[in-house]
Amino acid sequence: MESDSFSLDKDSPIGFMDSGLGGISVLREAVKLMPNEDYIYYGDSKNAPYGTKSQDEIRKLTFHAVEYLLDRGIKGLAVACNTATSAAVRLLREKYPNLPIVGIEPAIKPAVEHYKGGRILVLATPMTIKQEKFRNLLKSYANQADIVPISCGGLMEFVERGELEGPNLDDYLDATIGKYVIPSTESMVLGCTHYPFLKKEFKRYLKEKETELKGKEIELIDGSFGTVKELKRRLNEKELLTTSTQNGHVEFVNSSKDPEILKRCQMFLDLAE
Ligand code: DGL
């Protein structure tokens, strides 16, 4: 669909997309902030993970998801996937200049603002870390904090499988982030929308390291609230916020036909942090 061939209506739903179930961590913030809106969430679990694919593949898959949402008549778009944002958000904005679009990015800015001069771990997919957008973000804060990117290939799969805790996950964390968990570390940015569903496990894991950390608490930071606040601002700017006072509706669509995946969508939306 071309950018000028559709009109935006305040009664239309807001579209969300992610490579799978992760973007539901952003969607649940949107539902809290704008409960009267309707939402369509497109998860591309069949093609997940995006984070180990090439930039071209991610772009193709992202455009496919967004075109589906546009055909469904959305009035605004949240790219609820750090990987898709870094690979495709600029091109989406070029193609659809009239559509309010927000894309989540690793929340390095708020982490640096809180912990100037401190050590900040950034967990993200291999592709997010490789992208120029991320490199530029790092460069712009490099002299304000010690930022350590950690490539977490394989981590989103735990969430897709609904494995939010347990010994395998524990082993994964130990092998991937264990050596970075030292007392000078102030915070850990969850730079992939799947990771907030593992917050409980991260906290438990860090608590276990209490002695190594000398009692220090590492704060977990993610960009979902900032992203939905920006989405609301952009919709408001275009007078596209609903005037309904009824609770809105959330529809889940997924490229995977696995019934467990669809069940997990609602479960993840209802999951308290
Ligand atoms: N949820 C996605 C993100 O925020 C990506 C996970 C993946 O598909 O690798 O980066």
Image (cartoon, rainbow, N blue to C red):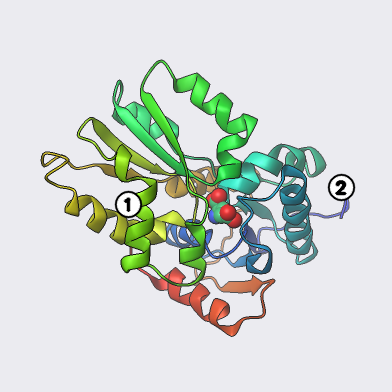
- What percent of the width, then of the height, locates residue 19? 62, 59
Three-letter amino acid code at the position of disc 2: Asp
Q: Is residue 141 above or below residue 131?
A: above
Report helix, strand or loop for mark 1.
helix
Give the Cα separation between the discs numbered 2 and 1: 50 Å
Q: Which corner quadrant holds the C terminus?
A: bottom left
Q: Residue at x 63, y 58 (%)?
A: 17
- What percent of the width, then of the height, locates residue 158? 46, 65
Q: Residue at x 57, y 78 (%)?
A: 262
Q: Is residue 234 visible?
A: no
Residue 12 horizontal side relative to residue 259, left or right:
right
Q: Is residue 225 above or below residue 10?
A: above
Q: Nearer the viewer, mark 2 or mark 1?
A: 1
Q: Judge the density around disc 2: few (<14), some (14-19), many (≥20) Cα neighbours within 10 Å.
A: few
Residue 236 horizontal side relative to residue 107, left or right:
right
Q: Which mark is residue 174?
A: 1
Q: Residue at x 87, y 47 (%)?
A: 4
Three-letter amino acid code at the position of disc 1: Asp
Which quadrant holds residue 47? bottom right
Q: Residue at x 36, y 22 (%)?
A: 145
- What percent of the width, then of the height, locates residue 255? 69, 71
Residue 69 horizontal side relative to residue 178, left or right:
right
- What percent of the width, then of the height, locates residue 141? 45, 22
The residue wearing badge 2 is 4
Q: Which mark is residue 39?
A: none
